[in-house]
Amino acid sequence: MLELYGAEGCPYTKELRESLLWDGKEFVEYDVEEDKAALKQLVVLTGGGTVPVLVEDGQVIQIGVSGRGCMVALPSAKEEKPLS
């Protein structure tokens, strides 16, 4: 199953989503601006904060669309530390 990591306001996420739908491909979509767990997974997969990212079987197969993408705010170190 394909996984699409994107952001609602990113036109390239919209472009990739529409391409996947047009091609009849099944995928699960994560909005990394709304889903903190998905944002953390995006960073694990890519080491950065560019969307859209397309993942298949746990492997990144595409970042951006035609060399273009949107940057999203990465989680701060403060957010990563558990409260004591």
Image: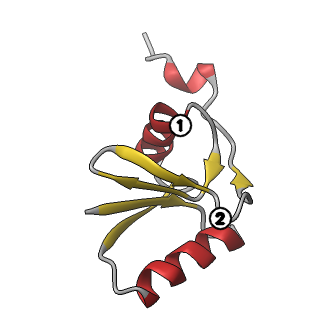
Left or right position of 41 against 32: left
Dot 2 crowding, Cα within 10 Å, few <14, some 14–19, many 20+: some
CB atoms at circles 2 and 1 under 8 Å apart?
A: no
Q: Is residue 40 above or below residue 24?
A: above
Residue 74, horizontal then vertical, whole percent:
64, 37
Instruction: Find the distance from the CA under tag 2 to the CA under tag 1.
Output: 15 Å
Q: Is residue 67 above or below residue 49?
A: below
Q: Residue extending furthest top? A: 84
Toward the viewer: 61 or 11? 61
Q: Amino acid at mark 1?
A: Thr
- Tag shown at residue 65: 2
For the residues carrying marks 2 and 1, which lies nearer the camera in this image?
A: 2
Q: Residue extending furthest bottom? A: 22
* Quadrant of the drawing holding the C terminus: top left
At mark 1, the secondary structure is: helix
At x 50% / y 44%, what residue is drawn? 39
Toward the viewer: 82 or 33? 33
Instruction: Tell me where residue 70 sits by quadrant.
Output: bottom right
Left or right position of 43 against 20: right
At x 49% / y 16%, what residue is drawn? 81
N-terminal-most mark, 2 or 1: 1
Residue 21, horizontal then vertical, whole percent:
42, 85
- Tag shown at residue 46: 1
Q: Is residue 67 above or below residue 60?
A: below
Q: Is residue 70 above or below residue 47?
A: below
At mark 2, the secondary structure is: loop
Q: Amino acid at mark 2?
A: Val
Left or right position of 78 against 60: right
At x 70% / y 73%, what residue is drawn? 11
Residue 29, horizontal then vertical, whole percent:
41, 66
